[in-house]
Image (cartoon, helix red, strand yellow):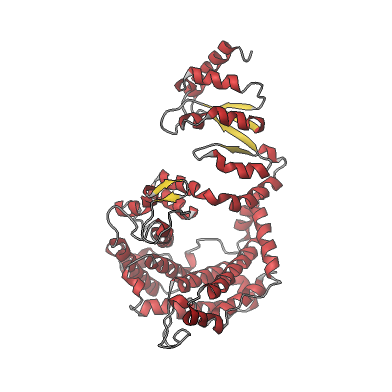
Amino acid sequence: MLTERYDIDFLRLHMLPHGEWTPFPPARDRESWERLLAEPLQAARRDELMREADQLLHQPCPQLPATLYMEYARTGNRSHYEGSYFRRRFHFSTLVLAEVLSHSGRYLDEIINYLRTICEEASWCIPAHAERLPNDVLPRPDRLSVDLFACETAAVLAEACFLLREELSAISPGLPHYVDAEIERRVLVPVETRNDFWWLNGGNNWTPWCCGNTLLAACYTLDDPERLAALTYKLEGAVDRFIAGYGDDGGCDEGPGYWAVAAGAMLNFLEVLHSRTRGAIDIYREPRIRNMGNYIVKAHLNGPWFLNFADASARVVPMRAISYRYGQRIGDAGMTNLALLSMREWQQDLIPLLRIIAGVVDDPRHVCVENLGYPFEWCEPLLASLPFSICLDFGHLWQRNSDWKAHLQHWLPRTRIMHLYGFDTTSRHYSLERAPMTLVREALHDIGNYTGVLTLETFGYDDTASSMKRLKECLGKEGLRG
């Protein structure tokens, strides 16, 4: 699919030159970053990241001694090594983001410590994936293993150097070149020159995961258009084989728990291609690509539950950003809605962010939480700990056949805004004439002495005018208002 349409000549012609591709503004582009930080919420996020990074300045880098690596071969334990391995990368990413957002210089030395430490690791491949000689508890020194996380490490380091290249070079002009060389030596050159990595055959989710991160690292690192085109074409072939392994229905035979790192990882690969070619590479309209995306919607049963098989759990939380972006690309509202639904575990993630919002507005009661297409009881743990108000949308309650009377009785004391409009089975907002008159009169009666804002949420003059007429009829008949 990809190699047939986008061959090496196409890639040479359409892939942007190295210096012209800027997927994000580098840290030195303060105008772009300050424009983002002018929003109070983004400034608060920067401050939170800086607090986390400040704590890391006083902590040692997680250690990865050889004895920890050897545990897997000796006992089968992989969690001890992997715990320190992933913490090391998470800490590094936190420091990089704090420096990019603050541009203070205070985190650069520690970022350099982490860059050198990661580049000095014996292998970027975790023990469970590494190739070893017989009876050897350490990775082979003569053949580099390139696995999921070696590719991911290459991408993370390459992006960090892209964002902070000027700042790092001011301290050590040779450091970014050293990191580039390690990325090439450990990942790019092996993938360019060898065909024995089994994931190049397209057999499972390793293919798009490794290909996406390898391509991202190459796009940041390689300044040779011929070399980049050749490597990209090779990776396209691997992803083509991955796509060909799917049926026309797009079903993921590894189960819904793997979707985000299978079709979702393929999305990351396609997004890098799309970005580097300014949209010239685009296969999102292909039926199989579409079906590979919305498979996750078809496999969804209810709440956090999915139709599970293979070794996938029945309880899945799809990656929200992947589901949402995939849905945008293929024009599938079900996928974007699923991204919101996947916030089933949202309380722990969202409460700190909502507290930030509460802290930057003049009065948190002016922030309203609206009932939409999700079960509103999900919001109760948040609203129990935050002083936000309620936006009560009658249309959504009526459209979903919810117990609107119980919802109104429970939330009326905290309701600041109400929405009224007519409805049908779609999500459009129609004139109030489309709502049963008895239902509207009953709602107006039940709100009693409500003194907040009541809006007619219609989107056009005719619908608004006819809604006003219906509202006056209802109010006049009940005698609720003058």
Residue 315 drawn at (x, y percent):
46, 53
The residue shown at (58%, 27%) is 455
Q: Could you tell me if residue 419 is visible in this image? A: no
Q: Is residue 116 above or below residue 103?
A: below
Location of residue 427 by image quarter: top left
- The front one of 9 and 63 is 63
The residue shown at (60%, 78%) is 63
Q: Is residue 140 above or below residue 281?
A: below
Which quadrant, please, contains the C terminus? top right
Residue 260 drawn at (x, y percent):
43, 58
Q: Could you tell me if residue 312 is visible in this image? A: yes
Left or right of 464? Residue 132 is left
Q: Is residue 33 above or below residue 176?
A: above
Location of residue 60 by image quarter: bottom right
Left or right of 424? Residue 62 is right
Residue 101 drawn at (x, y percent):
64, 61
The residue shown at (46%, 30%) is 399
Left or right of 428? Residue 92 is right
